[in-house]
Amino acid sequence: MAPQRRKATLSSLGEFGFLASVLGAVGRGRGVRVGPGQDCAVVKSATRSWLLTIDSLVEGVHFRRQWLTPYQLGGKSFAINASDIAAMGGVPRYALVNLAVPAEYPVRSLQRLQSGIVRAAHDYGAAVVGGNLTGSAQLSVTIALVGECPERQVTRAGARPGDHLFVTGTLGDAALAVARLQQRRPVPPAVLHRFSTPAARVQAGQTLVQRGWVSAMIDVSDGLLQDLGHLCEQSDVAAWIAAGKVPRSRVFRRLRAEDRLALAGGEDYELLCAVPPRFAARLRQMRRVGGCPITEIGQIVTGRGVRVVDSSGRLVRIEAGGYDHFASRSQAAPVD
Amino acid sequence: MAPQRRKATLSSLGEFGFLASVLGAVGRGRGVRVGPGQDCAVVKSATRSWLLTIDSLVEGVHFRRQWLTPYQLGGKSFAINASDIAAMGGVPRYALVNLAVPAEYPVRSLQRLQSGIVRAAHDYGAAVVGGNLTGSAQLSVTIALVGECPERQVTRAGARPGDHLFVTGTLGDAALAVARLQQRRPVPPAVLHRFSTPAARVQAGQTLVQRGWVSAMIDVSDGLLQDLGHLCEQSDVAAWIAAGKVPRSRVFRRLRAEDRLALAGGEDYELLCAVPPRFAARLRQMRRVGGCPITEIGQIVTGRGVRVVDSSGRLVRIEAGGYDHFASRSQAAPVD
């Protein structure tokens, strides 16, 4: 007899063995008529309108295995999709998961990865209703997420000159974590947490959209300047932001981390929104929305592009653009 | 000045440049309120129930670049998802596309890949409503598809002893194509076409489900024996099939291709269904359903497992199981 293998891997277990072993745990949820294990899931909606989004995390592009546990990778894969749903004021409901996994990947890791997804889905009130497992040289997790659509539709395209710009939470921690991981420097736990376990601002997004307080919204995934650039382009407006007002975490400030990381870092998964003047004062006063701090950082104006100004109104140049998988940092186009 | 590059690649164009250049072509379709370019798509349904599925094609696992043009790869990626919708009697409606692409992949190829997806979606009456583009060492296309759900729900789990087994179209051509491509032998165009441009049996699936003629159904993607095995397991029944009755194409028969390819080959994307006795005679007589030939191949019985018998009722052993990305052929468990 051959010596027993110490760890079960996918090639020893096979696709169907694995699917059978993990899919039992998922698929329970409100409105789920048929869960995983069929050709399709069947779901029933409370509303007729749906939000649909898809996003992917790829090893070597978005993460390294030593940076994220499989469980964290699963949770993060769900959260980045929930963040897109949040940016439209919706509620995550049904997830489809595609796992592309090297044959030598341990089954135990895969189970933890799956647990991370299922747990995150559960925490956001959603259910994993189907999935696909495929062999691949490179580990990647792709999730398609279906969300309930609010009555009001808010996209990136509604900002008007005079609107005020607000952002939830703090920016820059995730990029600071990546920078320090790359430099092999220690990363404070609170900062690492923002990279490994981002929180989608679902409640804040819902409140902002339902109350009609926002004219345009986007989630900050590619860096504030780049995502604000998308919002401006699609709204056919320009914007300025006050560098000093961009909210940073206490640890970020204590470490005197570079402005660039907060302004152009990426992976923040906060919400950036344009707020018409008649609601801005109220939001400024509230300071929190949907349980999350919200801060005014600038304004929408006529024209094109995004400018960053310091406290005396002078233009600040930010060197690096946001994250683009296909361009090296030096090739990235300046944002303003 | 550096010499001009002959071909635009993703690394020269960047993700946003590419997305902007291709996404204009998509997103138009019935019920599409907000198309690509936002955090989510917004779609509106005619029905409250939906079918959801996700599937992926990975280079080196499901295809090699020299076997499929980018346009064919796009079309096939859509069709394999449409086939899952067909197996539940549904209609494909909204697709989300995740492209994982090496930086050196030519933009022109990517545009053709995208065109293949958009065209296939259009041909099936669906729309591409959103997407994501990510860098990757390995080319892969993942599509999540939302379909309209029929009133009647048919899964893999409804087959009863006494039901007759029918299969649409012919089996084995796709596996024959792959076998010959791997052996570097010429592949007849009709056989290659079945591999490169599979057709999802959407109309047949709809008719079979709407008329109430099927008790269980599955699409044949991993090979007849393996997929029949899934259907039997989920229905808690056994089945036998007559090897000689499994429909093969004219070219397949002319080439005297191995039985194994038709019985266990995979990638056929035909529908396999269990038909209660009171409808079997009618279907046998009709010979076609939803524009597609349909053939009786066996029967559901009590017990466990799947047996293949020859014309005199003797057991036939089929060596290889269906396709499992993580097991080599020799490791694959015998099917019966």
Image: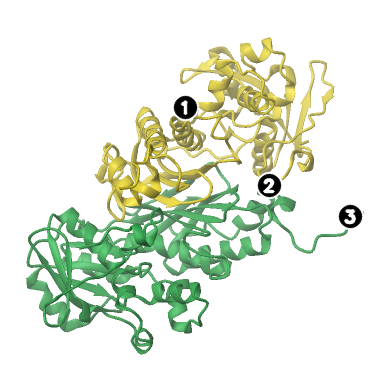
Chain colours: A yellow, B green
Of residues A67 and B108, the one nearer the viewer is A67
The picture places residue A124, in percent across and down from the top left corner, at: 39, 30
Q: Amino acid at mark 2?
A: Phe
Q: Which residue is mark 1?
A: A211
Q: Position of residue A29 (x, y in %)?
A: 28, 36
Residue type marked 3: Ala
Residue bearing mark 2:
A326
| Nearer-N-terminus badge (1/2) | 1
Instruction: Provide the chain ID for the residue under circle 1.
Output: A
What residue is shown with label 3? B2
Find the distance from the CA under tag 1 to the CA under tag 3: 54 Å
Dot 1 and dot 3 within a common chain? no
Answer with left or right where residue A299 lies relative to residue B129. right
Q: In this picture, is B211 found above or below A105? A: below
The local crowd at label 3, few if under 14, some if 14 to 19, many if 20 or more residues have their Cα within 10 Å, is: few
Q: Is residue A143 above or below residue B319?
A: above
